[in-house]
């Protein structure tokens, strides 16, 4: 048994030695080669792009970690990576901030394409792509025996996603977008307000909102790079928290708009604003309250391009629910589900209307005052009638002088 244990220790020690090269976690049996495409890993994040390069082939090619830089910026230390020797194999890691991606020569390109939405209308959608490369410097000599290394990378960010706010009982909902979704924003908010000042958030009473109450809504982005604006494609409502509910009512779709809906701002800043009058779904006719869930499909647009990306009107066709689900899933939609907007039907009995003590005292005072006034009026008439009898007798007597 002891002999087996010693053999295992020797094997582990031998493997450990073979997996080290110049102090780095590299195995000559696997890494004595020139770099290949699989040696770079790209992670397209919300705020940063992370690049991880297998350092061992770079080392065996005759270079060091300081020889690698973004887009040929070898003289700028901020454009170099850093060694992570806690992994196997050793990695060189580059971190690119989306807010300052041009500082190391990374290129941002925005492409625009026509895409049909769930209503069958043509909509222009933008896709932001960040591309660049990591390379080694050119030698100062005429010839070189070292291979020139270059790693290309790119990240595509779809700029359309679903904003679904059903947290309307508290008037706000935040959607934290996961890094795997690949979007330039980290948080989206769909907020409800009392009026057009967009200062005081809406508080929905326990009894629900009265029908035709005007509610002001805002789709707002935070941590969004200044080059992007928010463009609302369309917003609709459902009686349930499911954004794919077959029963839905559109507030606005492209150029079509509900008469009670007003679009106040769209595509001009990092906030879209609109208002609408609350209603009830007829399916809730036997209920005292109706629930309304709000959903908005929103896209980002480059501020200079937003005017040309405004919705294009077309012939509406019958909605295909299955196509809608596939479309939503393909675009990497972010969905958050919570409580509803609550409206009251207006058919509640009078006894259900709550009265506080102050209101009760005022009503009682008015009733008592009215009774006292009526009694005083009757008493006054009685007294006046009693005094008028003699006067009536004198006027009825005949004057002998006119006989």
Image: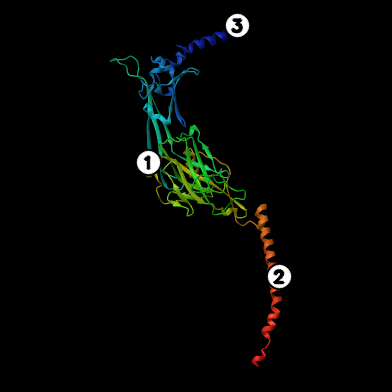
Disc 3 packing (10 Å; few <14; some 14–19; many ≥20): few
Residue at 38% across, 44% down: 307
Reply above or below: 218 against 138.
below
- For the residues marked 2 and 1, what is the alpha-carbon distance in whole angstroms? 83 Å
Mark number displayed over residue 305 = 1
Residue 355 in view in this figure: no
Number of the front mark, 1 or 3? 1
Label 2, secondary structure: give it: helix
Disc 2 or 1, which lies upstream in sequence?
Answer: 1
Cα distance, mark 3 to mark 2?
125 Å
| Residue 57: quadrant of the picture | top left
- Image check: 48 left or right of 140? right
Name the residue nearer the viewer: 376 or 215. Answer: 376
Question: Along the polypeptide, which appears first: circle 3 or circle 2?
Answer: 3
Q: Which residue is mark 3?
A: 3
**Seen in the image, is 226 located left or right of residue 364?**
left
């Amino acid at each position: 048994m002891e002999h087996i244990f010693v053999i295992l220790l020797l094997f582990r020690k031998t493997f450990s030695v073979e997996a080290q090269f110049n102090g780095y976690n590299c195995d000559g049996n696997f890494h004595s080669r020139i770099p290949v495409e699989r040696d770079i890993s790209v992670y397209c994040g919300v705020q940063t792009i992370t690049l991880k390069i297998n350092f061992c082939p770079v080392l065996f090619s005759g270079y060091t970690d300081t020889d690698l830089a973004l887009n040929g910026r070898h003289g700028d230390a901020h454009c170099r990576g850093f060694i992570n020797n806690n992994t196997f194999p050793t990695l060189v890691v580059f971190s690119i901030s989306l807010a300052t991606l041009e500082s190391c020569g990374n290129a941002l390109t925005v492409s625009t394409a026509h895409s049909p939405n769930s209503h069958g209308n043509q909509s222009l959608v933008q896709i932001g792509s960040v591309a660049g490369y990591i390379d080694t410097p050119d030698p100062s000599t005429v010839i070189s025996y070292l291979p020139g290394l270059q790693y290309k990378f790119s990240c595509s960010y779809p700029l359309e996603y679903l904003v679904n706010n059903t947290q309307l009982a508290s008037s706000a909902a935040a959607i934290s977008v996961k890094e795997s979704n690949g979007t330039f924003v980290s948080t989206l908010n769909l907020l409800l307000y009392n009026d057009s000042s967009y200062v005081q958030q809406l508080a929905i009473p326990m009894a629900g909102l009265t029908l035709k109450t005007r509610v002001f809504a805002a789709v707002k982005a935070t941590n969004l790079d200044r080059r992007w604006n928010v463009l609302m494609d369309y917003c609709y409502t459902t009686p349930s928290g499911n954004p794919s509910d077959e029963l839905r009512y559109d507030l606005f779709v492209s150029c079509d708009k509900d008469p009670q809906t007003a679009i106040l701002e769209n595509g001009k800043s990092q906030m879209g604003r609109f208002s609408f009058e609350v209603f009830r779904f007829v399916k809730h006719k036997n209920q005292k309250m109706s629930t309304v869930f709000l959903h908005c499909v929103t896209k980002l647009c480059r501020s200079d391009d937003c005017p040309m990306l405004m919705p294009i009107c077309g012939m509406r066709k019958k909605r295909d629910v299955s196509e809608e689900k596939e479309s939503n899933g393909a675009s990497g939609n972010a969905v958050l589900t919570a409580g509803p907007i609550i409206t009251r039907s207006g058919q509640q009995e009078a006894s259900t209307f709550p009265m506080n003590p102050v209101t009760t005292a005022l009503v009682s005072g008015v009733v008592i005052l009215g009774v006292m006034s009526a009694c005083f009026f009757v008493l006054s008439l009685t007294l006046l009638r009693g005094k008028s009898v003699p006067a009536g007798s004198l006027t009825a007597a005949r004057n002998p002088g006119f006989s």
